[in-house]
Amino acid sequence: MSHLAAQLGNPREIAQLARAAQEGARGRATPRVEAMFRAAEARGHALMGDAGAAQEAAGRAIDAMEAADPASGDDPVWIAHFDEAYLADELAHCHRDLGQAEAAARCAREALAGHPESRVRRRAIGYVLLATAQVQQREVEQACTTGLKAVELLDGLRSHRGAEYLEDFQQRLEPYQEEPVVREFGARMALPAAA
């Protein structure tokens, strides 16, 4: 539910739903499940601009993930996808939303290093997160190069979320729209739509 709230742009609900999940599963949630709940809470706080609360929830998510034991067999089946790479991805979102470009780039790189090639959409989103962090650091040429990696991955997919991420990235490039590399990126983005 908190992921749906994020897509609908309701950051307060993200944090509230994540806390409700924590409360409802108290004493029964495995560390991996707890990490997911805490990461969702961190995202909500980050979207609201509350760096302190986001950092606290993110720290608890990291601690919970470090305590997770995949060999225990205690995790529910539905949490299998939530691993260290996915957590890094969630934290990259938090840092991006808080304007912490260096930390966002670091977490995006960690996510990309951990996501297998089969997670095409997650990898594409990771590249967009990294590219966004690079724009925030005014590394526009590198950001466009990184952004093109996401475009290439998403070319073969029908992903509404992927398209939303690319649209957000393009909006972040608008202050640099006169730079040739940004114009080239925009032209490359226009190609699939024209085909």
Image (cartoon, grey):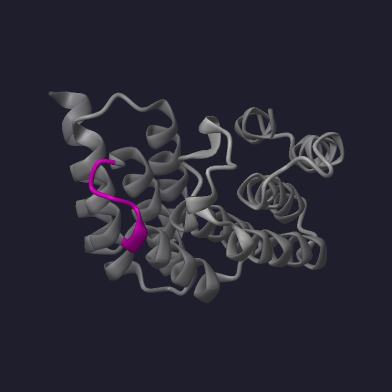
136 is within the stretch colored magenta:
no
* Residue 5 image position (x, y, % from top left): 69, 30
Instruction: Please name whichever residue, 85 or 68, is drawn nearer the observer in this view of the structure.
Output: 68
Magenta span: predominant SS is: loop
Residue 22 in view here:
yes
Residue at 61% x, 49% y is: 32
Q: Nearer the viewer, residue 129 or 77?
A: 77
Question: x, y (%) of residue 78?
Answer: 53, 31
Q: Which residues are magenta?
A: 113-118
The quadrant of the image that shows the N terminus is top right
- Left-right relation of 91 to 163: right
Q: Is residue 103 left or right of residue 128?
A: right
Name the residue furthest left.
Answer: 195
Q: In the picture provided, is 161 more to the left or to the right than 49?
A: left
Is there any visible trace of residue 176 in the rendered image?
no
| Relative horizontal placement of residue 41, taking residue 83 as reference (left or right) | right
User: Residue 60's quadrant in the figure?
Assistant: bottom right
4 lies above or below 83: above
Which residue is painted at 78% across and 66% down in the image? Answer: 56
Above or below residue 179? Residue 153 is: above
Q: Position of residue 125 (x, y in %)?
A: 39, 46
